[in-house]
Image: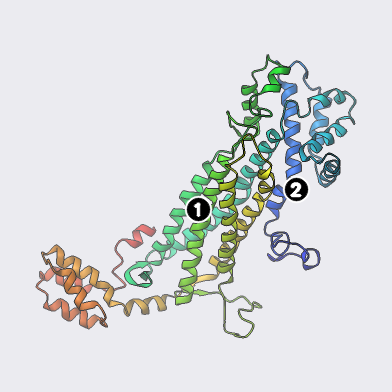
Amino acid sequence: MSRYSSPVILLSALGPLDGRYAEAVRPLAELFSEQGLIRQRLKVELAWLRALCAEEAFEPAPPLSAGEAAFLNNLEGDLGPAAAERVKELEQQTRHDVKAIELYLAERLREHGSLVGRIPMLHFACTSWDINSSAYGIMLSRARTDILAPVLEALIGQLQCMAREHAGLPMLARTHGQPASPTTLGKELAVFVHRLKRQLAVFGKVPAMAKCSGATGNYNAHYAACPDVDWPDFSRRFLSGLGLEQSPVTTQIEPYDWVAEYCDALARINRILIDFSRDAWSYISMGYFRQKAVRGETGSSTMPHKVNPINLENAEGNLGVSNALLRHFSEKLTVSRLQRDLSDSTVLRNLGVALGHALMAWTELQKGVDKISPDKQRMAADLDAAWETLAEAVQTVMRAHGFEDAYDQLKDFSRNQIITRDTLHSFLMEVELPDAARKALLALTPATYTGIAEKLAE
């Protein structure tokens, strides 16, 4: 199936991630949709109930029997669309999304006679954010590990293979858009590979954190009901079992600093990829990259010859949308009025949107990179027309041999002049350099003046 989803079903979608691009981001939709959030909240509530029943010091909830445990396991495996729909019906009555989770589970526990007595333990001593912070922590962690990282690693792999293949392919560099000391295509790509690998490692190390400490973070209700339990340690062990790190001192909410770190790290990756998209687009514009024509694709509605870099442009646009949201998350979520205000809730529901635009961009870049290949003849022609770039080498060698005015001599010689191999060699023959130095400079060409670029790329 193409990246574009079924026109019959999704033409009425408000946003492109639920319409035009729905198939491409489906894995994230399963995590971050309303149904996905409900499913994860239900799982956290069930995990809390199991943990309470397994805690020896918690007398109100004896250990689960084998039959009870099996029922809960089956229940957890049955948290599909029907469960989400029932939770939403209950939410219409309660006007509270997490309370609806508790009521749904109470309904289901009544299906098993001995579990009726466990209903008071549902959501025991919890505030809504004890459940939400765990749910969002798991969702963001799974999105990173299972969806985002593999796609980014594949893209980095593409760029790395291309960098190695063209490690020694000479190319005219440009600083400020002007011809500059030559480089190699492989080395320029290797820069992006290194940057992306480093930021992916930073992104991967951001700890997924949560809290489970009650209404204002002090375990008030926990100790009022059961003072013999070491509740901070119990909370730590519970969260660790979910793959989360405990945020030990909080208000009603986990303070979202780690979410900001997560968003900032992801935004840096996106900015690097914007940089790459623009550079690759420019290389296509200059003729350094050629694009594979895809049979049936139309580049322009009026110019039949065109093959547009649509994947790179699509990626750049999606990366920008993603970063606008990620920046808002980072700035907004870390600020809350006193213990909490509810403005965080509606913002958090858009986490999947930011990740979806990033995922869409990354997959578009994979396609775009797969379509491009270097035009070696065009690169060679540009290098052969840029002998002025050797002025740097000449003036530096002259400095090494004591010429105090080397820079000024080369500036006067090269600026606003058409420099060719012959004019440069004529200049070199007039300069009083040792024969070995002059011979080395005479042998130099723009295509061979690439320093150790090839080694760096490899």
Query: What's the residue at 75%, 48% (across, down)?
Result: 34
Q: For the residue carrying disc 2, how many other residues have a C-alpha within 10 Å: few (<14), some (14-19), or many (20+)?
A: some
Q: Amino acid at mark 2?
A: Glu
Vertical side of 308 occupied by 123: above or below: above
On screen, residue 162 versus residue 170, left or right, reads right
Mark identifier at residue 34: 2
On screen, residue 380 versus residue 107, left or right, reads left
Quarter that holds the N terminus: bottom right
Q: CA–CA distance between discs 1 and 2? A: 28 Å
Pinpoint residue 19: horizontal percent, then vertical percent.
73, 62
Q: Amino acid at mark 1?
A: Arg
Label 1: which residue?
268
Query: What's the residue at 57%, 84% (across, down)?
Result: 305
In the image, 20 versus 170, the foreground residue is 20
On screen, residue 368 versus residue 418, left or right, reads right
> Hey, which residue is sitting farthest front in the picture?
337
